[in-house]
Structure formats: C-alpha cells, structure tokens
Image (tube, grey):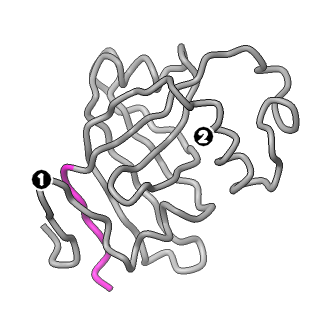
Amino acid sequence: MDTNVKHIEGFYLIPDSHKYLLEGSIDVILTTISKRGYPHSSMIWSSYDGQNILLNTGIGYQKERNMRRNPNVSVFAYDPMEPEKWISVTGIVELVSEGAVEHLNQLCYKYTGLEDFYRDLMPELTGEERVIVKITPKSIRVDAN
C-alpha cells in the first residue's frame, strides 16, 4: 500500500492530495467484470463522501448488470492538466436505490451546470430507474508525487 494512503478503522481513505480527482468534475473510469470474465470499462461521473466513491447508473445498463453479478470493481482517475497525477481504487460495490435521482442531479449540476438531468440534459431517458454505486475502497494506489 502506498504510504500516502491512510487506513483507519477498516476503511481506506483517499489521500487529501488526490481527493479533488473524485470530488471535482473529472470523469473517472469504472471497470467492472463482464459475464464472460472480461474487463468492461466506462467513463462516468463521480463524487466522494469522505469514505466511499459514489457513482450513478441506470438499472439494466451493462455496468449495473456486471456489478450485481460481481461487486468487485476498480475506479481510475487522472488530472487532465497534470496527467502524472492519478489514483486507482479497487473496491466492493453496494447498489443503493434511495436518493439515486437526487444524487444524479447533484452530479449533473457539478459536471454540466444543469440542475435536472432528465429535464435539462437527457429527456429521452426520463422514467429509467437509477442506483447509486457506493464503492468502499479496499486498495488505493496513487502516483509517486
């Protein structure tokens, strides 16, 4: 484990120097495992609650089906202005329905400045069911900086 990563009470905490990669408006790469055992990667919006990485997806999407089958995932993010600054987190997923649309709208505002994902950005997806992807870190790697 990198010396920049803190392990407290069974949780791995994102180093302060790298939190902005998950808290800001930088797209992250989520990698899940497909039914056939192959990696499946998607670019996705993220947030960080101080303990868990939070993503959001629709029920029935490939990544959601993969996570229901196998909750082991990885998330990778790097700073596009400083590409040598990166973080890689592996963890276990919990899918949470409660508050998913509100969380999606928070992400939408953070990433686009638009307040309502369905009304302002993707009206054609109105009516889909959403889940919050709550990732508990089990391993964290960061750049050498």
Residue 134 sits above or below residue 110 on the image: above
Q: Are marks 2 and 1 in contact (CB under 8 Å)?
A: no
Label 2 environment density (alpha carbons within 10 Å; few <14, some 14–19, many ≥20): some
Instruction: Tell me which amino acid carries mark 1.
Output: Gly
Label 1 environment density (alpha carbons within 10 Å; few <14, some 14–19, many ≥20): few
Disc ID at residue 132: none
Instruction: Tell me which amino acid carries mark 2.
Output: His
Judge whether residue 78 is colored magenta.
no
Extreme residue in the front direction: 98
The image position of residue 48, as x and y in percent, is 45, 56
Which residue is painted at 32% across and 66% down in the image? 14
Dot 1 falls on a residue whose secondary structure is loop
* Residue nearest the observer in this picture, 63 or 105: 105
Residue 21 sits above or below residue 55 on the image: below
61 left or right, relative to 67: right
Q: Main secondary structure of the magenta part?
A: strand
Which residue is painted at 33% across and 15% down in the image? 35
The image position of residue 132, as x and y in percent, is 49, 33
Circle 2 sits on which residue? Answer: 103
Residue 91 sits above or below residue 64 on the image: below
15 left or right, relative to 12: right
Mark 2 vs 1, N-terminal side: 1
Identify the magenta region: 138-145
Circle 1 sits on which residue? Answer: 10
The image position of residue 59, as x and y in percent, is 54, 17
